[in-house]
Amino acid sequence: MSRQLGDSHRRFLQTMMTVGIVDEPGARALYQHCCETHNTQCAPDKLDDFIDAINSKLQPMFMQIRKGMSEDSGQQYYALVNMAETDITRMSSDYADNELELFRKTMDLIVNAENGKASSTDILNSTDSMTTKKLKKSETELLLKRLVHDKWLNEKQGEYTLSTRCIIEMEPHIRTMYQDQVKLCHICHSIAFQCQICENPTCGIKIHNPCVARYFKGRPEPRCPACDDFWPHEIPEVRRHHSQSRR
């Protein structure tokens, strides 16, 4: 397949550079819009090929449009990621040293929590052990709002989780820094933070909630796919995803 980029590819990339991350329906709508705008053929099943062509040109710049799943909804997303560094230092142009230190501490809390969440109270308390300039409570609260706005964290009822963008972009860093703590989902083999865990102490596999919903759907007696023990957790409903664009 020709890897020459046309105007439709360039328009798609420019939009990704602006928004950073888009859900799969949004990516498909954007693909169609770019093709229609520049009078090029749009094959609905060729989105990944279209993105691969863009990625082939991004490779020398250590950039990539990478696909990943939302742990919360199971929706697929596409994110433009910087692969030049696999550390949080890529955020250093936007955040001060003490802000990055707090983000690292927040990530530590989330990764080490069984439910993949960190409370605002625990994050505020973690400022006591900062080695850089300590953040005041008001500064910490503003920083957390900014990290949510910039799509590094999600917040719900005072609890923080790693966003889909963060997991997609930081995956190499997370796997390296937390290799003893991080487990992969037994079904989709992606990093699993918000998940259900097999209660058999000799098993303990993790499965994302959306993967649990899909895997156990229609099964009369849910059993662990690894050890065959009874799966005691509540099985969530399979979510239906709307096909609107989020450009």
Image: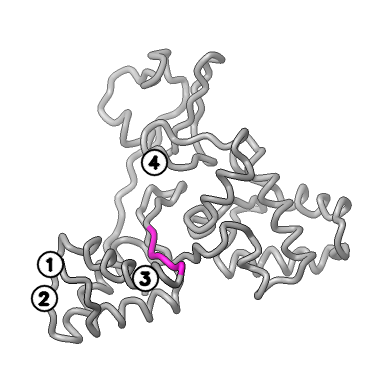
Q: Quadrant of residue 48?
A: bottom left
- C-alpha separation, residue under disc 1 versus residue under disc 4: 28 Å
Question: Does the residue at mark 1 contact the one at mark 2 (Cβ under 8 Å)?
Answer: yes
The first of marks 3 and 4 along the sequence is 4
- C-alpha separation, residue under disc 1 versus residue under disc 3: 20 Å
Q: Residue furthest front?
A: 60
Q: Which residue is mark 1?
A: 43
Give yes or no for residue 64 being in the magenta stretch. yes
Where disc 1 sits, the SS reads loop
- Frontmost of labels 1 and 4 is 1
Q: Which residue is mark 2?
A: 41
The first of marks 1 and 4 along the sequence is 1
**Which quadrant, please, contains the C terminus?**
bottom left
Q: How many numbered discs sit on the rendered protein?
A: 4
Question: Does the residue at mark 1 contact the one at mark 4 (Cβ under 8 Å)?
Answer: no
Range of magenta residues: 62-66
Residue 223 placed where, x, y %? 37, 18
- Frontmost of labels 1 and 3 is 1
Q: Which residue is mark 3?
A: 246
Where disc 2 sits, the SS reads loop
Where disc 4 sits, the SS reads helix
Q: Amino acid at mark 2?
A: Gln
Q: Amino acid at mark 1?
A: Ala
Residue 242 placed where, x, y %? 29, 59
Q: Residue at x 43, y 51 (%)?
A: 70
Q: Amino acid at mark 4?
A: Pro
- Frontmost of labels 2 and 3 is 2
- Frontmost of labels 4 and 2 is 2
Q: Residue at x 17, y 63 (%)?
A: 46
Q: Which residue is mark 4?
A: 210
Give the class, few, some or many, for how many residues have Cα within 10 Å of label 1's Cα (few <14, many ≥20). few
